[in-house]
Amino acid sequence: MALLLLSRGHRGLDRRRHMFDGGAAAGGILLGAVCAVMIMMYKHAAGDLPLPNVSFAPPPPGALLAQLRTSIVQRHTLAGNSGKSVVQAVTAAAAAAADAIDRLMDVSSLPHLFLSYGNAVYFEFVQNWAASMERIGATHVIAAFDDAMLALCTQEGLPCVSAQFATTNDFRSDFVAFRAMGAIKVRLALMILERHPQLPLLVVSDSDTVWLRQPWAYFEQRPAADFFISTDCLSHQTEEDWQPAHENESCGHVPGNAGLTFNTGLFAVRNRPASRSFLHAWATMLTNSEQQRDSDRTKRRIDDQLALNLLLDVVLVSALGPSEPRVGLMFNNALRVQALPVALFPGGHVAFVQRTPWKLGVEPIAIHLTWQRWSRAGKVARLREFGLWHIDPPEYYGSAAPLHARSGSSSSGINAGGALQAPVNLKVLTYHNDVLAFVKRVAAQRYEGGRMPLLYMHWLGMSYQLAAFRDALAAATMLGRAVVLPKLWCWCDFDEVPDSGILETCRINAGDYELPFQCPLDFLLPIATLDNLRLKKQIDYRLAGFLELPQLPPAVRNSRSVLNIAPRQPPGPHPVAQATMGHAATVWTGISQASLVAAALPLAETAVLELRGEVPGLIGSFANPLAAAAFDQMFDRVLVETFWCCFTWGDEDEEYRTLPYAVPQPFALAEAERCPWQAPVLQVPAWCDKAEASPAAAPSPPQHKREEGAISPITPALPFFPDRRCVEEVQLPPLASCRHYINLTNGLEAVPRLQALGLDYSYLRLPSTRCEQQQFEALVNDLDGDLLMRLALGQCCLVYDFGSRNKKRGAPRAIWYGLEFVRYALRRLWLGERSPAHLRGHSVAHTFEEHVAAFSTATQKKIRYYARYIPPGGLDRLHLYGVYAATQRDGDKLFYAALLRQCKGSGTSAALQQQQQQQQQALQPPLEGTTTQQQVQQALAASTAQVAQLGQLRCEALLHGDTHAAVETLLGMRIFLGGLKQTEFEDWVSRTGYVVGGQLPTVGL
């Protein structure tokens, strides 16, 4: 993209005077410009840089290119900076930039200043950022990290200053360079504020942010804050509620929660002593060689974002006061911090997937392109789809271009002499997307009541939309038009980590969105591949929303006709143009290229043709078999990465198991072998485990319903995923002999059941967020002394919890993740054993070992204290197990509080329980009539009724008999013994032979 931008002139925007600092680059500007051109040409030729249709010269010889690359690397890397230390190099680069800013503008007279940065690799985003600055009328400056960036800036007239330190490469792949970039960014911000105490506010944002409107009112209305910072929070509702212990790991910045969620891609600093002191500490941390890695067990490298989160330490935050509940005292209570709300300053997921701001009826102030797919190409595509990519040339929209404009110019369309070229002859083909109706229809045909699993719906809908795009693209190719995609719909989100809730709910549970949802194009197609094909002029396409963009000229926007798709060829399909009512023509399913061209010929001068009807299966054949084969070969490149991800992850599974979408038949297939397109049937992938039921709970044979000649399974929901119980006989003491622990908060639902049975219990706190954020040392430190003592004595301890993410099976993360780690850590510290550990079928023993080895001396001493009480014969097994079920009450704090008040006491006997309830009711005001109280009374009554129905003799027999049967019959829950290795599970499958069709099971819970 940088090469294209080198040839562009001004964008026609009203600019102030634009200069760049040439002091540091006077001798290297020409070399930088030439090098930028050659390097970007090389990247383009290698297919790494998607660009619009522009003609390029061939790349330079490899030796010359390498020499030019080496020249920049040697001159501007930190390691080669004349022997300077990192501190000196960072300080020098920031000081040079600050000096240049002072020469560029009178900073002290400004009410606010915006700062961004980048090198030549990121110039397209820098340019788009600058365009958004112009649109909101903000004074801005850009720190350029290399000569090539300065060359591009001077070509485009951007206000860049030299802060040279890096290479022309993507420095995100070089941690030392990336860390130094963060240090220069922070140090430069500090220098600007120190040099100009009259400057009230400095706003710093990454180049992949885009500003939609002015933020002044927002900042001015919050005078108490010293420092504003964006977050990676995925939930506007969680921020709106602003509650402690909300258990949304993405929003750990809310006081009373834990998590490193601040994002340094956008922050604003008031020019106050507290702010400057914090920036100084931040920059110092980034230049301290002894602080390159975090001291905690994760051993992560400390970049600018992790450094900020560690310094602010949100766990210790306290609100400023009742009048400012959202301003937190951080950094040793010295800095007043305000988190920027995601409704106004969203990241990529909140903005482009959940689309939260627009659902709330507000326009965001700025968007930071986080949570992206397909890297830079994906970011550009999302901005284009929302009309926020401001640097496409007028020709992209079919507008007139200047007669003497450089190739790819993004100017307004008027050249120096005011002359215009003739309008670009842009012709497009778009199509109606009726995927919602299609999926609903097929679901009703294949599943009783239309209750098709969400993942099946998603796979079916995406397969349909993929087939529609393929045929629309073929039709556009035949008609010599660009294809404009419609809005896409998804039933499942994407996430590489399955335990975010994806496998259970098809949503990232931290978000605020319903299914199905409108999704960006990158959910279906590989954007980088499409852009490379467009660059090679093999296809031409525009994104959804293109026809509604304000840049589209009226000559294109208002010239529309319809191609109606009939299910079969009608008589007389080609109307005469004069007799065409409403400018329409008729095409049909399975149409040939010759017939399509003939049908559309009367509408050839129309700028926009729209296909209406079922698009998959529209194209039957190409006129030329070689053209069909070439199209198939081209589309095969698109199909390489059309799938849903991910089912698995972990140390022993680097494949990130995926589910490919159904692929339409090739056009070059012999006519005798081709079949009309029909709704595909989901098949279990070859890698997928075929069983997930124990012999005692074997499912009934799948039913089948015939639909359009296809057999579609209707399989009942399976009762549970097998755990170690499937392959290992563990003798548990009777339920009456076990110790019972309620995991707060959801575990409280087990209290009425335990009390009805007269079982004693205690409370403990194993937050799932500890597992999600890998705060394992804190997890172990949270363990109660009573639990540790009884485990050391060899007693059986059951931890009760209820899960909300897996609605069917109720497997809480604290049970299948937290207890697995606790068992490993205790055996390691007590017995010196490195025992097996598995999460979702994958070995995590190596990861667990790293965390335990990183425990502080104090933590190890605390845990090892209890080892002295282990019986002389040792422990054959650590009897710590989870008891779980599903809940629908997750987050219902009123219910749990009322339940606990009603169930106060240990439940040693029914008579004592009744006495305690009577005493409590006499002391507390009545709550009868409230919905919460009614729900509590129903829960208590249900537990009592269940025991009464079984009878005392039956209950006593179960309490002193088989523990699994007692838990399932008396409590309606299940015991989780521990993680199961995938190969063990597969062996169990082969022995039992249980195969379940039409399902996508997952190993473990």
Image: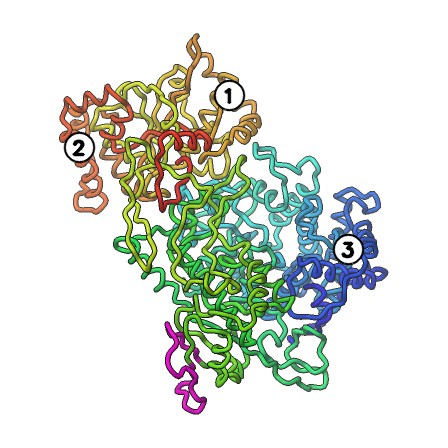
Which quadrant does the C terminus fall into?
top left
Q: Give the range drawn in magenta.
A: 562-585
Relative height, residue 648 to residue 533 (above, below)? above
Q: Which amino acid does label 3 sit on?
A: Ala
Q: Is residue 285 magenta?
A: no
Find residue 96 and name its label: 3
- Circle 2 residue: 946
Q: Where is residue 290 in the image (x, y as percent from the top left)?
A: 69, 35
How packed mark 1 is, by other alpha carbons closer than 10 Å (few <14, some 14-19, many 20 or more), is some
Q: Can residue 161 be seen in this view?
A: no
SS of the residue under disc 1: helix
Residue 30 is left or right of residue 812, and the answer is: right
- In this view, the residue in front, 80 or 894, is 80
Q: Where is residue 858 in the image (x, y as percent from the top left)?
A: 54, 23
- Circle 1 residue: 828
**Depth-wise, is mark 3 or mark 1 nearer the camera?**
1
Q: How many labels does the image show?
A: 3
Q: Residue at x 30, y 55 (%)?
A: 446
- In this view, the residue in front, 617 or 288, is 617
Sooner in the amino-acid sequence: mark 3 or mark 2:
3
Extreme-bottom residue of the structure = 578
Whole-Å distance between the Cαs marked 1 and 2?
41 Å
Sooner in the amino-acid sequence: mark 1 or mark 2:
1
- In this view, the residue in front, 665 or 255, is 665
Please report contact status of discs 3 and 2: CB closer than 8 Å, yes or no. Answer: no
Q: Where is residue 14 in the image (x, y as percent from the top left)?
A: 65, 76
Sooner in the amino-acid sequence: mark 3 or mark 1:
3
Q: Position of residue 561 (x, y in %)?
A: 45, 81
Residue 340 is left or right of residue 163, and the answer is: left
Q: What residue type is labelled 2?
A: Gln
Please report contact status of discs 1 and 2: CB closer than 8 Å, yes or no. Answer: no
